[in-house]
Amino acid sequence: MNLIANFAVLASRRTIFDVPVCDLGWDDALVFINELASFPVGQTVISFVNAHNMLMTLRDGEYRDILLQNLVLPDGIGLNIASKIAHGAPFPANLNGTDFVPALLTYMENRRRVGLIGGRREVVEKAAANFRKHAPWHEFIVISDGYFDKENPTELIDELEHQDLDILIIGMGTPLQEKWAHHHIRADHARLVLTVGALFDFISEVVPRAPETVRMMRLEWAYRMLQEPARLWRRYVLGIPVFLFYVMQYRFNRRERILSQAGNDSSPLPAPQERGEAAH
């Protein structure tokens, strides 16, 4: 991550499970990430995390360590509730990738070369076509579908080296996409990398979005669960309560650690001054 993005992580006031999550509002996030994309050196990898992803960090140390190096944006109502529990207020905006990535591409006025990796071939091709309609001043290139040798992606990396991309969007599912990007994608491949999960399914319209009213009510998770109950019921019905339990546990344990450290602080206090003694 370049120094500007690293500063954003350090400046984030909120952590969930000790992972910094950027608490910018919608407009500030667009401005900030557009600046990152224009930065001439370094690389920024952006991850969108929801409650399910954060639970993964508790059992997958490699994934957690990678998120600590990425710019992490909050996705979904679970993160909002966690922020209220841990920090007393929700995040300023729901920066989910499905809405934020198209908005970011629209916000970027300068022409960018944008590469896409992930999903089925017909899905990623349709996603690229819809991106071209959405932001026709950018150039969208399908680098690969998601069916390639993840351990030895020599041909794909060779293709990236010839494409001179500004932005790379990777949709291979969490935590695979974050780990793969961390191990294989260099700054000379793309300065800005977005790991986006199932974004291509939604952009291609293979998977329908919830109606706008449902999204405004922050109930898209319920709509998705009704669409794919076999795959998602455990994540939402069981996962969110478990997530919130751990958030409360973390908050309590963190408070205990702070109080314990304060109680064990053996540094001497300055001696009280006598009345009338001048302070130097």
Image: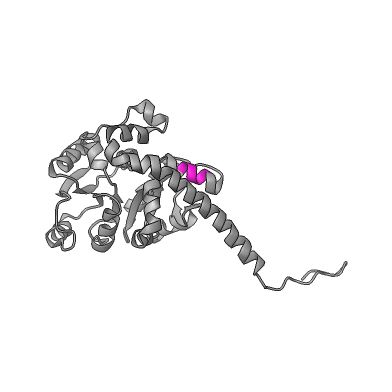
Figure quadrant of residue 158: bottom left
Q: Is 220 situated left or right of 185 in this image?
A: right
Q: Is 116 situated left or right of 80 in this image?
A: left
Asked whether residue 81 is drawn in magenta, I would say yes
Q: Is 91 situated left or right of 1 in this image?
A: right
As rendered, which of 116 and 244 lies closer to the eye?
244
Q: Main secondary structure of the magenta part?
A: helix
Figure quadrant of residue 151: bottom left
Q: Position of residue 39 (x, y in %)?
A: 34, 56
Looking at the figure, which quarter contains the N terminus?
A: bottom left
Kindly give the residue lying farthest to the left in the view shown: 155
Q: Is residue 91 visible?
A: no
Q: What range is drawn magenta here?
A: 80-84
As rendered, which of 164 and 228 lies closer to the eye?
228
Q: Position of residue 227 (x, y in %)?
A: 28, 32
What residue is rendered at 55% in x and 58% in y? 254
The number of numbered discs placed on residues in the rendered structure image is: 0
Figure quadrant of residue 129: top left
As rendered, which of 186 and 280 lies closer to the eye?
186
What residue is rendered at 66% in x and 66% in y? 263
Looking at the figure, which quarter contains the C terminus?
A: bottom right
Asked whether residue 1 is drawn in magenta, I would say no
Q: Position of residue 242 (x, y in %)?
A: 44, 47
What residue is rendered at 32% in x and 59% in y? 43
Q: Is 101 situated left or right of 118 in this image?
A: right
